[in-house]
Image: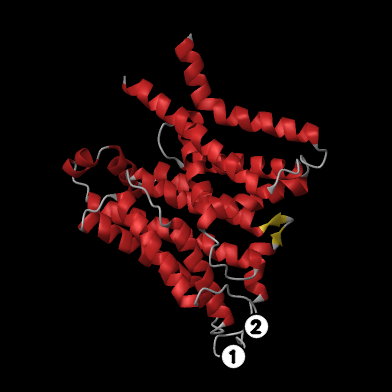
Amino acid sequence: MKNKVLDFSFKYGALIFIGVILLFFSLYNQYFFTYSNLTDILRSISIVTFVAIGVTISLMVDGFDLSVGSTVSLSTVVTATLMIWYEMPLVLVIVIPLLVGAAVGLLNSLLIVKIRIPDLLATLAVMYIISGLHRTYTKGYSIYNNMQLTDGSKAPGKMYDSFLWIGQGKLLGVPFPVILMIVAVAAAHLFFKYTRWGRQLIMTGGNEEAARLSGLKVKRVRMWAYVASGVFAAIGGILFASRVGSGQIDAGAPLLMEAVAAVFVGYSVFGAGRPNIIGTFVGAVLTGILINGLTMLNVQYYATDIVKGGVLVLALAVTFIHLTRRKS
């Protein structure tokens, strides 16, 4: 009986908790359970969901990418400078940051796969390198329309309206970032569930030696996993720049913990016991609802970090208690 209760709580605990806090905040504030507020919650988690998908992919191959936060910051300022400093076409404004994210992923995979530095240490080092790079590139300044440059002149360009629409516009009454997020979650879920490449990533993370003996080129698989992680972080950075209309040098710093929390909450969803895309999305939704509800309760914004940390600790505790039980 005890085991059944524990298994049930592990499989459905996160979903039940979401239902409970939805009910609580709805009873407390009549404006919480409204279409506009619910879409605001989804829009607020769209960026962190993209970053969390990248972290999920790196965890699927039994790795861990700590550099996603810095990659978000780098891609955000690169995106902004391409418009405000160099007035480049919109296509290049979007493509170049994606290539930058892929380059960060390649650097991670070089250190991890070729030089064999442990994932956490390699991505921690890259996190500091990228952080220093984007601060050096911008000389420590955030990027905004017609900003004053260090030589006394003004930047010639400004954020394009078509670019800002990506983060601020609506399509059929639904915020466009929400549509992008749902498409990305669905596409990533189908990729891992129904494609050969997706199953190879899962096999590599499940048992690397067995995957190698079965003929998989595990080094190449791990390399592409880190490249994908960097690209998803770059998409998060592009979306961030389009939403706020500027390039913020510390944009990605708080997103790392939120993304990691979402991924580990997702471990327990439907009893998966491993990183999975749907679980990560549920974890991001849980974090978004909590932060939105606490804001409506007039809790100070800096206190929400306590909640984020608490959710992460709870998710880790539930996950590792279950994994320990399963091994024993």
Image vertical order of residue 267 relative to residue 143, above or below: above
Question: What number is the disc on residue 116?
Answer: none
Image vertical order of residue 191 relative to residue 84, above or below: above
Residue 276 image position (x, y, % from top left): 44, 40
Image vertical order of residue 100 relative to residue 57, above or below: below
Task: Specify the quadrant of the image occupied by residue 325.
Answer: top left
Three-letter amino acid code at the position of disc 2: Asn
Q: How many marks?
A: 2
- The answer to whether any part of residue 50 appears in the image is no
Question: What number is the disc on residue 146?
Answer: 2
Q: Residue furthest left?
A: 213
Asked if marks 2 and 1 touch (Cβ < 8 Å), the reply is no
Q: Residue at x 39, y 62 (%)?
A: 128
Q: Nearer the viewer, residue 139 or 191?
A: 139
Q: Residue at x 36, y 48 (%)?
A: 64
Q: Residue at x 54, y 26 (%)?
A: 12
Disc 2 crowd, CA 10 A, few/some/many (<14, 14-19, 20+) = some
Q: Residue at x 40, y 60 (%)?
A: 127
- For residue 187, side relative to residue 174 (left or right): left
For the residue labelled by badge 1, is the local secondary structure a helix, a strand or a loop? loop
- The answer to whether any part of residue 111 appears in the image is yes
For the residue labelled by badge 2, is the local secondary structure a helix, a strand or a loop? loop
Colouring method of the image: secondary structure
- Which comes before the other along the chain, label 2 or label 1? 2
Residue that mark 1 sits on: 152
